Image (cartoon, grey):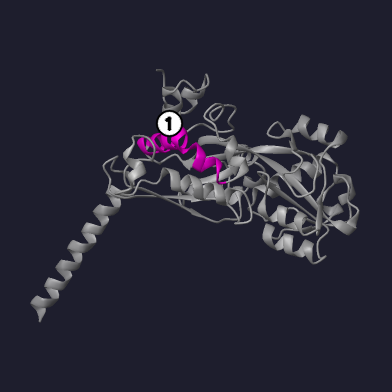
Amino acid sequence: MAKQVVRVLTLAGFLLAGLTLAAIFARGAGPSAQRISFVIATGPTGGTYFPIGEAIAGIISHPPGVYRCERAGVCGPSGLIASVKTSQGAVSNVLAVNAGTVAAGFAQSDVVREAVAGKGAFRRSGPQKNVRILADLFPEEVHLIAAKNTHIKSVSDLKGKRVGIGADHSGTIVTARAILSAYRISLAHLRVSNDPSDVAAEKLTKGQLDAMFFVGGAPVPLVRELLANGHAVPVPIADKGRKQLLARDTALSAMTIPAGVYPDTGPIETVGVDALLVVNNAEPDWLIYGINKALFNPANRAALAGSHRAAQSIRVAGAASDLPAPLHPGAARYFAEIGKLPKGARESAGLGKP
């Protein structure tokens, strides 16, 4: 009996050792690894990050036996299995990437700027020192949506109203606070809701909320549904308040949502940010290099652009420019190789002189 127990324990030890070695090889041993898990944090399913994240995961994944991956550079490194997970949004994603609980995540440029400085939403947690940028992806517009019967026609009309400014760990709350401040509206002037976007949209439909902010590349599914059903109207972010906002917050820029992007709407003046894909600095250089090579491969343009209108803006030109944090060294090596690495980005990424 004792010998049988010893055999069982010995077998268990061998199995545990085998699994441990497999895990080690799967994450960081190099391009010959058999399986590499790469989780991308996105956002709510009713936003923009989720469908584009799914498309990117499908493009860069390289499981064994996939015919399209036989062409060099079309897929990510061999054995890469990318997947997406939902989240509250950009702040949550940056915290998760910095902690290493996910490999990558979508985040707004203004959120990443606060993160690396340890300001704003990151005052308590401090500077997020492990966050690096894989690429600048696409512009995101700020959507301000109001219930139809509230007669809200500008940001200034929000005073005294029930307003959803985004969940606590979303990117929307960061941008919404900046906008309200520029228009000299304190949170004390509002009846603030911090519900997740899907809950806020439902409350607006039921008359329990007067207006809500949401940051995402147009068209945002939940915004489109609200407008199509006649429950809400878009509110422009324009006039003198916008000028003051853009002067004090360089992470934001003037944007216009074209006519027809949403049902029965003309052009909508607003502001916006850039959506970035950020990664943990511990991710292997060869892995991030290979992911970027697949992401910007012309053979994947159709699949990427077909995921969402905003994804049509994902282009290699400008993907490494004007970033609020350093590039990951693997990403910097890719952009340098194709001649798209801006001056000074090499040193900030830690590549040193060529």
- Element marked by disc 1: helix
| Viewer-proximal residue among 105 and 230 | 230
Secondary structure, magenta segment, majority class: helix
Image location (x, y in percent) of residue 203? 76, 64
Image quadrant for the N terminus? Answer: bottom left
Reading the image, the residue beneath label 1 is 329
Image location (x, y in percent) of residue 87? 57, 55
Q: Residues within 10 Å of mark 1 (few under 14, many from 20)?
A: many
Q: Residue at x 41, y 22 (%)?
A: 352
| Viewer-proximal residue among 15 and 292 | 292
Residue 299 colored magenta? yes
Image location (x, y in percent) of residue 195? 70, 60
| Quarter of the image where one finds residue 73 | top left
Q: Measured along the vertical axis of the image, is residue 10 above or below residue 169?
A: below
Q: Residue at x 21, y 57 (%)?
A: 18
| Quarter of the image where one finds residue 204 | bottom right
Left or right of residue 171, residue 352 in this image: left
Left or right of residue 320, residue 261 in this image: right
What amino acid is found at the position of numbered circle 1 in the picture?
Answer: Pro
| Viewer-proximal residue among 224 and 114 | 224
Q: Residue at x 32, y 47 (%)?
A: 79
| Quarter of the image where one finds residue 29 | top left
Image quadrant for the C terminus? Answer: top left
What span is in magenta? 285-307
Image location (x, y in percent) of residue 255? 74, 35
